[in-house]
Amino acid sequence: MVREHDPRLPFAFYTRPMHTLLVLAICAVVGSAVPPSSWDYKVAGTAADRAATARAAIEETLRHMDNDTAQFVNPSSTPRIAGHAIADLVELDVATGEQRYGALVEQYLTVSARTLEAAGMVNFTGSSIFGTAAALAYKTYQTASFRVFAEQAWGAANAYTLTWQELVAGTKSGKSFELSQFCGQGAHSLLGGTFSLTNSSSTSLNVEASGSFLVLSALLAETTNSSLYQTAALNSLDFILTHLYNGTTQSLADSISASKDDDCKVNSEQAPYNVGRVIEGLAVLYSVTGVSAYQELATNLATAAVSSFAWQDSSGIISRQDTKAGDVYLPRGLATALARGVLLSDARDLVRAYLGVQFNAVTKNARISAAAAAYAQSWTAKAAPEEEFGAGAQTTAVQALIAGVNVEVDSGSSSGSGSTSASAAEGTTTASSGAQEKTSTGLIVGLAMGIGVAVAALICVACFLVRRRRRQRRQPTIEEFKVPSETESESWRSVSAGVPTFPSSPSLGVAHTSLYEPTDSGSEPISPSSFYGATPALQPQRGRPGPQVRTSSDGPGGVHVLPGKRDAQAEQVAWGDQVAWGDIDDPSTRPRTSLSAVGISTEELIRTLYHRIEAGGSSSSDAPPPAYPE
């Protein structure tokens, strides 16, 4: 992102590493994609059966809502929980591919906007979940009113998101403290961070608020193609990755203080909802941009999240440290990543199994009674029959049920009625058996891949050695000179035309040699046949380095003196490894042939050839070369 320069700020402010660079530097942490044997991940029934289970829970949720206010009558409820209930309606339609709840969602959002405005929460200020529900509804139902609601909520959240102009000034409207301009070793700004609370004294910029704004911005960017929303989404992701992301552990800290007095203090607490929000945002951004780096980051975060002991034990059931409750955002984020195809293949089965664990935990442990579709807060322990309905617990459980709708049914699971009332012991035993089978398969596949890599490496080494030996064997050498007889000397000394005549060597097949190249530099490369047929018009080369030669000890045509230019337009002689490059005056490239026919000493011959080459650079093309000394 290009920013207008402000002389009051150091250059580091404008050169903050962008999220893409951070993402590309991430090392994959995906290990085994086999679910642990301690997970109860096999879900019963079909996708339609699981959708019916989720729908029954939604109907139970709506029974406790006041249609006049679109809020829960439960006094402990908050407007935010009502937003989750509305979002659940859209999520289930997305999971099933239906449009059953479009009109009801529009009704609830309209009433909610009026109710919240009367309470001072204009444009859904204070909870972006309404905006997320509206943006997803606009994508799903294509109703214009949903876009209006989503953009209103975006504007409210954007008002509590830091801009670089505010960071330059050091102040934020509605906040009573001076802002930190830079944080971290690289002096990175807090651009894109969203405040968790709207009150003037709250300094916290957290992942939940920033991640929610990331998701909302990305959804609007997807449905409107507006660069405004895409830029906002990228800024939110930049902030999270720069200040709250740990690439080593693939984890997210909770928040950072924006107050200058707090010196960028970070709350390192980990929570599943933070990871879920970021994974969902990455999934939508991947749909918008197609950037593969988002796949890698989302996969790494997802794999680390389903394996983390920060909010679950070996059972894999989510149990938040603060409340021992389940979570709404992690199942939602993982399900979105699966649906949008953002996860790499190694992690998909593991994530599906994890969502199966949550579905089973909710239906087997959290259901308050068999007669009602009401669910308790904890997913790890059996709910007491006398436990009262809680709006927050219900909407959280509904999200886990929706996320489990499209989990693939394992071939060993039961089918039919879709009931999930089978005992936990049976489910655990079956899951353990299936996991062991997958583990064995994984070991076999891994062993086979390892052997294949080793064999390939040995083949490569063998090919290298054979190729090297072949080249060494075919390396041209200069044979020992011998003094020719007088008869041999006379037969080689013909200079009647001013040009020495060289007899063709049957062993080398040399028909013609030249220090020239074709006049037309754009002509086709010389083929081997040109050395045995007609010779193109030639011109002497001036002011050029020594010409190049390709030599072969046993290839057809033997030695050919080529132009000095060594590129794709130079002469092509297709003899594979039989050909080597070298300068014409390089002894290593001279042909393996006896010079006994030449009636001069070695020193005289070399000296004469040298002067001949030098003289050729300034002589006319019509002038004959100098004769050899007698």
Image: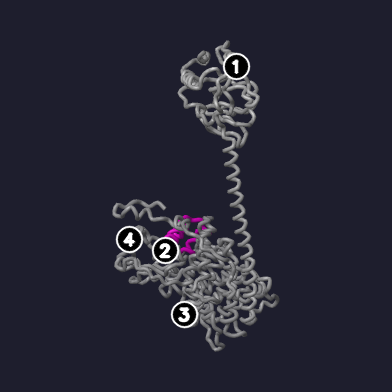
Q: Position of residue 234 (x, y in %)?
A: 45, 58
Tell me the residue at 61%/36% (across/down): 576
Chain-order first, disc 1 or disc 4: 4
Tell me the residue at 54%/83% (across/down): 381
Residue linked to disc 4: 181
Residue linked to disc 2: 158
How far is the residue under mark 3 from the one under mark 4? 35 Å
Chain-order first, disc 3 or disc 2: 2
Residue 238 counted in the magenta span:
yes
How far is the residue under mark 1 from the one under mark 4? 92 Å
Instruction: Tell me the mark number nearer the camera, choosing from 4 and 2.
Output: 4
> Looking at the image, is 20 positioned above or below residue 509?
below
Q: Secondary structure at mark 4?
A: loop
Residue linked to disc 3: 323
**Which span is picked out in magenta?**
213-239
Viewer-side residue, 524 vs 388: 524
Give the quarter of the image for residue 496. top right
Give the number of the disc on residue 448.
none
Viewer-side residue, 293 vs 108: 293
Type of amino acid under label 1: Glu
Type of amino acid under label 4: Gln
Residue linked to disc 1: 488
Instruction: Tell me the mark number nearer the camera, choosing from 3 and 2.
Output: 3
